[in-house]
Image: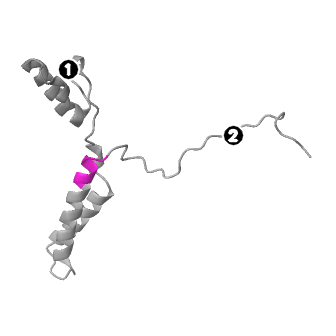
Amino acid sequence: MASSAGQPIATRAQNFVNSLIGRITGYNPFPQTGTVPQTISIDGMFNKWSGIGLGAWLYGMLPVKQLPQKGKAKTLGKSLLTGGVLGGLFSTGNPHNTNLISPSRAITVSSSEVSYT
């Protein structure tokens, strides 16, 4: 948006639309004015924290009076659900990539490089 200072109003409007839609969806309707990468992750909202928060909130909403700590579970559930959704919305990277082991490359050694003693 700062690069469109001094441009005609139509070009500035196209830059604004590209910035808004590009950051949310990754699609740039006016590619001639530049491309904007997607920075908001809709898939990231559905993560383990929002799931735990939803479960705790539903536990607090159950109509059974004998359940312990219903009020605290409901409060904690709302907080976790809100934090999980907001944190996942602005997260970067693939939310479905849970592989903690980094890929390794195979090392090949030719027989001329190996010395036998």
Residue type for callout 2: Ile
- State if disc 2 and disc 1 touch (CB < 8 Å): no
Q: Residues within 10 Å of mark 2 (few under 14, many from 20)?
A: few
Disc sitting over residue 107 in the figure: 2
Magenta residues (range): 85-91
| 15 vs 40: above or below | above
For the point 13% across and 73% down, which residue is it? 63
For the point 21% across and 66% down, which residue is it? 77
Q: CA distance from mark 1 to mark 2?
A: 46 Å
Q: Secondary structure at mark 2?
A: loop
Q: Quadrant of residue 67?
A: bottom left
| 53 vs 3: above or below | below
Name the image colouring. one colour
Disc sitting over residue 30 in the figure: 1
Disc sitting over residue 103 in the figure: none
Residue type for callout 1: Phe
Q: Quadrant of residue 84?
A: bottom left
For the point 79% across and 34% down, which residue is it? 110
